[in-house]
Amino acid sequence: MIIAIIQARIGSTRLPAKIMKDLAGKSVLAHVVNRVSLAKKIDKVLVATTTEPADDAIETFCHENNIPVFRGASQDVLKRYADAARLVSVGENIQYIVRITADCPLIDPVVIDKIIQTAIDGRFDYVSNTIKPTYPDGLDVEVFTYQALIEADKNGWLPSEREHVTPYIKNGKGFRKYNVVNDTNLSSLRWTLDQDEDLHFISEVYNSLYQPGNIFYMEDVLDLLDKKPWLAAVNSSIARDEGYKKTLQEDIKQQMRFNMPTNGITLWNKAKAIIPGGNQLLSKRSEQFLPNRWPSYYRKAKGIQIWDLDGNQIIDMALMGVGACSLGYADDDVNAAVISAVENGSMSTLNSPEEVDLAETLVRLHPWSEMVRFARTGGEAAAIAVRIARAKTGKDRVAFCGYHGWNDWYLAANLADDSSLDGHLLPGLSPKGVPRGLKGTALPFRYNHAEELEALFRQYPQEIGTVIMEPIRNRKPEKGFLTQIRKLCNENDAILIFDEITSGWRMNVGGIHLRYKIDPDMALFGKAMGNGHPISAIIGKRHVMDLAQETFISSTYWTERVGFAAANATISKMQKINLPEHLISMGRYISREWSNLIQQNELPFLIEDGMPPLIHMGFNHPDTLSIQTYITQEMLKLGYLARESVYVSYPHTKTVVDKYIEALQPVFRSIRDELKSRTLTSKLEVPLAQSGFKRLT
């Protein structure tokens, strides 16, 4: 199916209500619809206008003349086109869309058919006579696929792309395009309607050529101009594509205003087509932050500064490598250890002595532990720990609290109930691909609800052999909670695993459980332990860890040297500078400054500071995603990566934080005003940020 969408609105600034002007007894819009309908290859003609009250007249005209009409966004014409096409696509297979503007009453159906046929024959994504104009201005025709339009609506963000519909497609690298050229270059002729001079010219043409029931074509108008050469001069002083060129200037201003990363956005869109999910970590997807505008990629990172692909320098007041870089990006001391490891060979047939050094350090820091195994990621560490615990107890069922990665044992919780992981950091994780036989083996309980774990032990007597939990995240443990968990595990012969992938190394050098004086049977570490280099560890009591030799757990790259060298250097520097003291101090400072802004603006926000080095702001408001997206949007304009949480890092000094808070002040004031008037969503320049796991399309 091929449809033509004619964009029309009353609100023209240079020539008000131009499309309703009279031409030989009919409106301009009526003539445009009629001429487009005469194209033989078009199956359906649709008028797309706005929801502005002034455009009620267009809807009335269409209804009176049995013309399909769609009403949508006023300024965002691309969205209007896409929404109109989506509506038609329900039950219909749209092959191509023809874009026509309602201010072209001399549009030629023969030219339209020629461009459509070119698109069909060449299987092009986009064909027009406008890439390099050779037809008169006013005979512009663009033909593009439905898929190209939807992609443009999803990813286009510049003013020119939103207002003029096709620049994202026309200028994009991923589309097959073709320009139809006329035998004679007639691009200097102006046959469109935008000003009084244009109306004078077109009226003369219609008065000379139009007869009801007959159609005249481009050649007829050219013959008329040969007879009346003065007619072509009536509007010849008006520049072609003046409106589009003006919008291009807005593009430049927009990019300067936002300091926007166009290369990063382009590369991210490419990545999504060839890498499932776009990258390897859900928490780094651009859609999680600022769809269509997040910088996505970096050239360099140092301290808390990031340089994106366009050379923009941005301050990270957000995730700091998703919590991996508590010493800051590219710390000199850690870099020196890593460079030495690389120069001396990061891999060989023999083992690296740094592995033993790191194991001894971890056991020394955690006196209750006696043995250590290593991996490279947190998810691997959790999988290894659960395997060892199951091997030790001979029991399959695992009780858990918190987030523990992507492994089958964890996602099995959602085989029985797809909401089982709700409240455990990432709701909605899909268990597709997880064997159905694991149903009922992963059992959740809520943080600070020891009674729920007790109930699970009663429900599954002698079947739960492993309890794995984060000892702390956004909330502090209530008095006696961790003690009761330890007691229940002892009473039920279950292995207690503390997952400290996130909590470790921030509040003290080692696991935060040391501060609460509760010893687990195993503990997991990663993230901050390597300051950006891949390393994770499973520490535990000998009688538990020995079981690792009775079940096969082995991998080549768990022996590479860089991770061990990075962790040894990172832990040494943490101790030397007393890193946790700084992280706690700055986290509490951010918390106080956030609280002051919240109180000053009477905002429904809550500070969750279970761990001050990982400070988090909650939004007690139904428009949570809009608030989160707006903060990220506005702070990026000011040169900050920012959202509702901050992983505090060593380079986050008071001076840095003060400047960040100063930048945040007008953003919070704006949120206050927009929430009162219920207009915050209208201030978003991008789609809402995604929450949790969602498939990228």
Image (cartoon, rainbow, N blue to C red):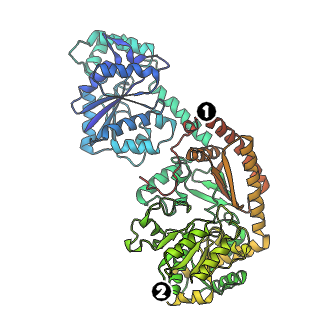
User: Are there few (<14), some (14-19), or many (20+) residues within 10 Å of tag 1?
Assistant: few
Tag on residue 677? 1
The location of residue 471, given as percent across then percent down, is 64, 70
Three-letter residue code for mark 1: Ser
- Nearest to the observer: residue 594 or residue 419: 419
Instruction: Report the side of 542 relative to 663 (left or right).
Output: left
Q: Secondary structure at mark 1?
A: helix
Of helix, strand and loop, which one carries label 2? loop
Viewer-side residue, 523 vs 15: 523
Q: Pick the residue in front: 660 or 610.
A: 610
User: Residue at position x 42%, y 17% from top?
Assistant: 18
- Ranked by sequence position, the earlier of labels 1 and 2 is 2
Image quarter of residue 102: top left
| Residue assigned mark 2 | 552
Give the vertical position of 613 relative to 597 (above or below). Answer: below
* The quarter of the displayed image where residue 187 is located: top left
Placement of the N terminus among the 4 image quadrants? top left
Neighbours of disc 2 within 10 Å: few (<14), some (14-19), many (20+): few
Q: Are marks 1 and 2 in contact (CB under 8 Å)?
A: no
Nearest to the observer: residue 597 or residue 445: 445
